[in-house]
Image: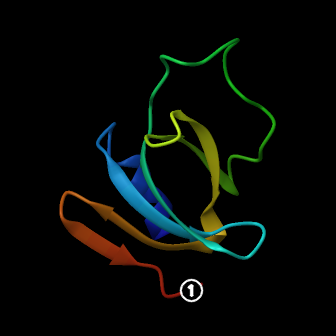
Amino acid sequence: MFIESVLKATQGKFFTVVFVKKDGTTRVMNARLGVVKHLKGGLSNFLDPSKYLTVYDMQAEGYRAVNLSTIISVTCGGVTLVNNRV
């Protein structure tokens, strides 16, 4: 998936992702990948990494899972990519 590869290429930069949550509401999140400061115990094996991306939510100051198939758009470095498949 193109959006997933773009997110993984952010290399720790801040990005904004808009996606549909499990309850059907839309969520806008400012996040980062690669944050390890707040990890307790290592890697999470709870979620399928082919379906979910674990990010660090900057406002909530905690880790969140984003369903890759429900991403609407991603903005990083002033460039916005819109997912037309949702």
Q: 60 or 15, which lies in front?
A: 60
Residue drawn at point x = 29 percent, y = 72 percent: 80
Residue drawn at point x = 51 percent, y = 33 percent: 61
Examine the rendering and report whether any part of residue 12 can be seen. Answer: yes
- Horizontally, is 79 left or right of 33 in the view? left
Q: 71 or 28, which lies in front?
A: 28
Q: Secondary structure at mark 1?
A: loop
Q: Which residue is mark 1?
A: 85
Q: Amino acid at mark 1?
A: Arg
Residue with the most extreme front position: 59
Q: Compared to 53, does 38 lie above or below? A: above
Examine the rendering and report whether any part of residue 6 can be seen. Answer: no
Q: Compared to 63, does 36 lie above or below? A: above
- Horizontally, is 21 left or right of 26 in the view? right
The image position of residue 50, as x and y in percent, is 68, 53
Q: 43 or 31, which lies in front?
A: 31
- Horizontally, is 45 left or right of 57 in the view? right
User: Quadrant of residue 63 in the image?
Assistant: top right
- Horizontally, is 79 left or right of 19 in the view? left
Q: 69 or 60, which lies in front?
A: 60
Residue drawn at point x = 68 percent, y = 46 percent: 49
Quarter of the picture holding the C terminus: bottom right
